[in-house]
Image (spheres, rainbow, N blue to C red):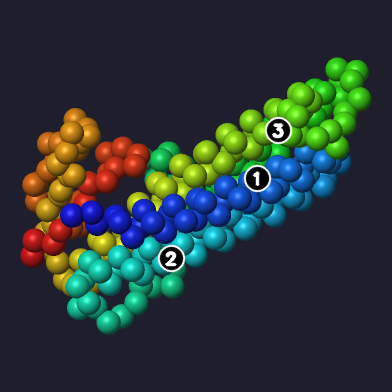
Amino acid sequence: MDVYEKTDRLAAETIQRASRQFNTVRRKVALLTDFDEINVLIKRMYNRLRDDNQRTFRQIADAEYLAASDGKLQDELEEDFLLLILDDYDPVTGYVYTRETERKQERLFEKVVSIISHEKSSGKTYQPDKPEETMLYPTNSEIRKAFDTAFRLWANMTQEYALRTHDRARERAFIALKGKSVMWHTEEDARVCKKCEPLDGKIFSIEKLPAKPHLYCRCWITLVE
């Protein structure tokens, strides 16, 4: 049973769209020397990424809320359900999603500025219009690396919060069904970690359900009563 099948698909599609955005903005940034223009491009990109993620997370939450209840729930999740997840400190990720989005934006801009500034201070003539396909101009190569790293970090965060949104929506459905206890399940395969293995089959009060023990945890719960 793969309870995350639809969530994985939606997250993968969102990450693919993000990849295209990172590549498009990277090419534009590589042609610029004005830091204000670069900042605007990067900021707009992260705003689009943030909005796209939120649409996907909401879609995941609504779908899992209905699926977990087997169609027994007719009401919808609260309007602020998703914001409560994204604006809350998460002890597993170690950050607040909304603030981390801003930090990722700031880090990428600072890295690009550092690359270009270093090139200028070296006494070389910065040539942003150098054909990047040749990969001979060092600055283009460094900018590519900076964007590749930023994309990887964004993709990881997107995947993690897709899972967390899924889990919270499942819990919310069980609460709405007046459930009291849930059973913890692992994937029961060779990749189950030492932290999760002892939890398999254990029953918890839904009000005292422990947090996922690590990032990208794919354990799941079922309603007992």
Question: Residue, x 69% and y 48% (percent of image)?
Answer: 24
> As shown in the figure, which amino acid type bears the numbered disc 2?
Arg
Residue 41 in percent (x, y) is at: 74, 50
Question: Residue, x 35% and y 57% (percent of image)?
Answer: 7
Q: Quadrant of residue 33?
A: top right
> As shown in the figure, which amino acid type bears the numbered disc 3?
Ile
Could you tell whether 212 is left or right of 29 in the image? left
Name the secondary structure under disc 3. Answer: helix
Name the secondary structure under disc 1. Answer: helix
Identity of the residue furthest to the top in this view? 122
Q: Which mark is residue 143?
A: 3
Distance from disc 3 to disc 2, alpha carbons, whole Å, reads 33 Å
Residue 176 in percent (x, y) is at: 23, 72
Mark 3 or mark 2: which comes first in sequence? Answer: 2
Mark 1 or mark 3: which comes first in sequence? Answer: 1
Front one among 176 and 6: 6
